[in-house]
Image: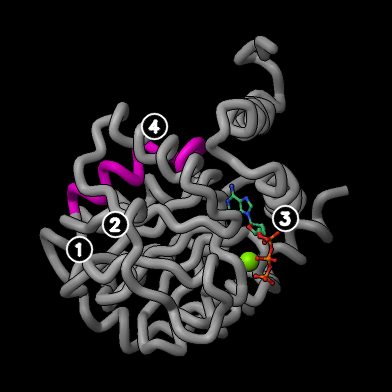
Amino acid sequence: MVVPKSHPRYESLRKRELILDGIRDGLVAEAGAIAHGRGEAFDYMMGEKTLPSAQIASIAAAALLVQAERPVISVNGNTAVLAAPWIIQLSELLNAPLEINLFYRTDDRIRKLTQFLEDRGAKNILGAKPDREIPGIDHARALCCDEGIYSADVILVPLEDGDRAKALVDMGKKTIVVDLNPLSRSSRTATITLVDELTRAIPLLIENVKAQMDDPDLRILTDFDNLENMGAAVREMSLFLSDAL
Ligand code: ATP
Ligand code: MG
């Protein structure tokens, strides 16, 4: 389908196409389309714009990533097809590996995602040869790499499922979750939650990481309260909704 750029829902339709192409190419599990749809509904409820609370959370997330000793970026199918150029750029900026980490794990999908990311210039990709397990979750979903998620201190986990997001926190990791749903378990268990759409959240995070590298602000990390910030996100969404009609 060719959607003209002038279409009012161009961006939204383009993202749907990326997810559907990803399913056809074996990069995204079918359930990825449902997860995407849930995200779209929440995005509608914030006017498809980054909320002020997410701008603050993004600065805190950048500060956390810049001071991390072993940052890792976890990548699933949706994240790869929607945001490959930006996660690759972030991986280089932070010298952080991209670890492919799938809910519906198959070796075929891992291979295809590795190739997809390599074709777009990614150099530091893990996930094909997992040698560790995240404690407390069942085997297939627990697999991870010693050099990556297992030994990381800070993990960016865009679109992570709630169980695994919690298991990582239980391991003592600091996590940054990107999730449009402020009520999801992933959002509520993260160290820092970016209640924002991935393709807005990651470019903004890159800008904030660059700014923090030039001029680090460590105070923001002590001042930032994630639950309070998510409360602000919900209030901002409610305000948007009550003014919408
Ligand atoms: P829980 O965290 O409570 O276990 P879940 O993980 O089961 O919830 P899923 O539907 O599996 O929920 O996860 C998808 C989540 O990702 C949804 O909460 C949705 O809002 C969010 N999401 C989907 N696409 C995007 C996107 N492009 N940007 C940001 N968030 C997104
Ligand atoms: Mg979730």
Closer to the chain start, of discs 3 and 2, is: 3
Q: CA distance from mark 1 to mark 2?
A: 6 Å
Q: CA distance from mark 1 to mark 3?
A: 29 Å
Residue 42: give its label. 3
Amino acid type indicated by mark 1 = Gln
Q: What element does badge 2 sit on? A: helix
Label 2 Cα crowd, 10 Å radius (few <14 / some 14-19 / many 20+): many
Place residue 13 in its image quadrant: top right
Q: Decide whether the magenta segment is chiefly helix, strand or loop.
A: helix
Q: Is mark 3 within 8 Å of ligand 1?
A: yes
Amino acid type indicated by mark 2 = Asn
User: From the image, which quarter does the N terminus lie in?
Assistant: top right
- Magenta stretch in the rendered image: 80-93
Label 4 Cα crowd, 10 Å radius (few <14 / some 14-19 / many 20+): some
Is disc 1 in contact with disc 2, using a CB cutoff of under 8 Å? Answer: yes
Q: What element does badge 1 sit on? A: helix
- In the rendered structure, the answer to whether residue 105 lies left or right of residue 45 reads left
Amino acid type indicated by mark 4 = Phe
Q: Which residue is mark 2?
A: 208
**Residue 77: x %, y % from top left:** 52, 44
Closer to the chain start, of discs 4 and 2, is: 4
Label 3 Cα crowd, 10 Å radius (few <14 / some 14-19 / many 20+): some
Q: What element does badge 4 sit on? A: helix
Residue 116: give its label. 4
Q: CA distance from mark 4 to mark 2?
A: 26 Å
- In the rendered structure, the answer to whether residue 181 lies left or right of residue 98 reads right
Q: Which residue is mark 1?
A: 212
Residue 26 drawn above or below residue 153: above
Q: What element does badge 3 sit on? A: helix
Place residue 26 in its image quadrant: top right
Is disc 3 in contact with disc 2, using a CB cutoff of under 8 Å? Answer: no
